[in-house]
Image: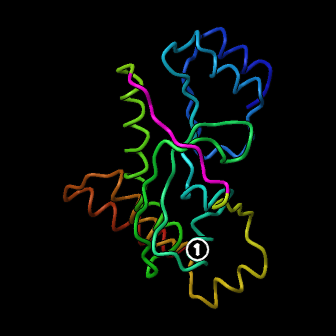
């Protein structure tokens, strides 16, 4: 993401807004400076990250796992400006949603995607209308950073009956999201699901 050619591409095409979604690379200062150039969008620079976790309490990775491990009532996504630190930029908006412990971690994330996309769409609409996208600095006293799960974490997940993923449920979620059904589709779907589950 920080390749010199990519930076040249941004500059050459005058790309004036950036959105990071599920990017596990840290942006260089050169990339951040490019989007903070007021010549691109005079009224407000726009370089944001849609983070799967409620900031500042859940910085880092696998934040939904950690929220469920911590027995939180809510989890959600945060839209924030990108700075030189991990998940530490000013918060634009958050979408707290209830966690359902009868579902897996991935299912809970999937159920929250629509509310997350609304955060991003709302900010982009304001930007397109030349309105200021307001933000608030994070409270560093509340900040916590999470890394990938350890062996002990997986033992704790099992003890707390936290499922990371349930393949059948995820397949159903994907099918419901991307397919519309008539009778012929339904028959084909049943055949596909049967073969998938057998594997």
Left/right of residue 81 with respect to residue 122 in the rendered view = right
User: Is 146 inside the magenta-drawn segment?
Assistant: no
Can you give x and y, in whole percent of width and height, for residue 198 in the image? 50, 76
**Residue 89 placement: quadrant:** top right
Residue lying at the far bottom in this picture: please name it.
159
Can you give x and y, in whole percent of width and height, for residue 100 in the image? 42, 76
Q: Residue at x 32, y 52 (%)?
A: 179
How dense is the environment of label 1, judged by Cα within 10 Å: few (below 14), some, or many (20 and up)?
some
Q: Residue at x 41, y 45 (%)?
A: 117
| Magenta range | 131-140
Say above or below: 82 vs 9: below
Left/right of residue 70 with respect to residue 178 in the rendered view = right
Say above or below: 142 vs 42: below
Label 1 sits on a secondary structure element that is: loop
Q: Main secondary structure of the magenta part?
A: loop
Left/right of residue 121 with respect to residue 39 in the rendered view = left
User: Is 139 inside the magenta-drawn segment?
Assistant: yes
Q: Residue at x 66, y 12 (%)?
A: 11
Residue denoted by label 1: 164
Say above or below: 47 vs 76: above
Residue lying at the far left in this picture: please name it.
183
Q: Nearer the viewer, residue 162 or 192?
A: 162
Q: Residue at x 78, y 74 (%)?
A: 150
**Residue 47 placement: quadrant:** top right
Can you give x and y, in whole percent of width and height, for residue 161 in the image? 56, 87
**Residue 25 placement: quadrant:** top right
- Where the C terminus falls, by quadrant? bottom right
């Amino acid at each position: 993401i920080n390749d010199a050619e990519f930076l040249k591409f941004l500059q050459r095409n005058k790309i004036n807004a950036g959105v990071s979604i599920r990017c596990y690379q840290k942006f260089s200062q050169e990339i951040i400076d490019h989007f903070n150039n007021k010549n691109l969008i005079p009224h407000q620079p726009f370089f944001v990250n849609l983070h799967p976790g409620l900031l500042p309490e859940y910085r880092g990775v696998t934040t939904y796992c950690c929220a469920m491990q911590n027995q939180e009532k809510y989890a959600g996504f945060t839209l924030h400006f990108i700075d030189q630190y991990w998940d530490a930029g000013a918060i634009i908006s958050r979408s707290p949603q209830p966690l359902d412990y009868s579902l897996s971690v991935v299912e809970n994330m999937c159920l929250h995607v629509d509310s997350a996309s609304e955060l991003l769409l709302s900010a982009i609409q304001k930007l397109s209308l030349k309105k200021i996208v307001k933000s608030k600095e994070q409270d560093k006293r509340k900040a916590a950073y999470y890394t990938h799960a350890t062996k002990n974490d997986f033992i704790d997940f099992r003890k707390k009956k936290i499922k990371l993923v349930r393949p059948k449920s995820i397949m159903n979620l994907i099918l419901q999201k991307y397919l519309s059904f008539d009778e012929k589709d339904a028959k084909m779907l049943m055949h596909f699901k049967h073969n998938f589950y057998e594997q």
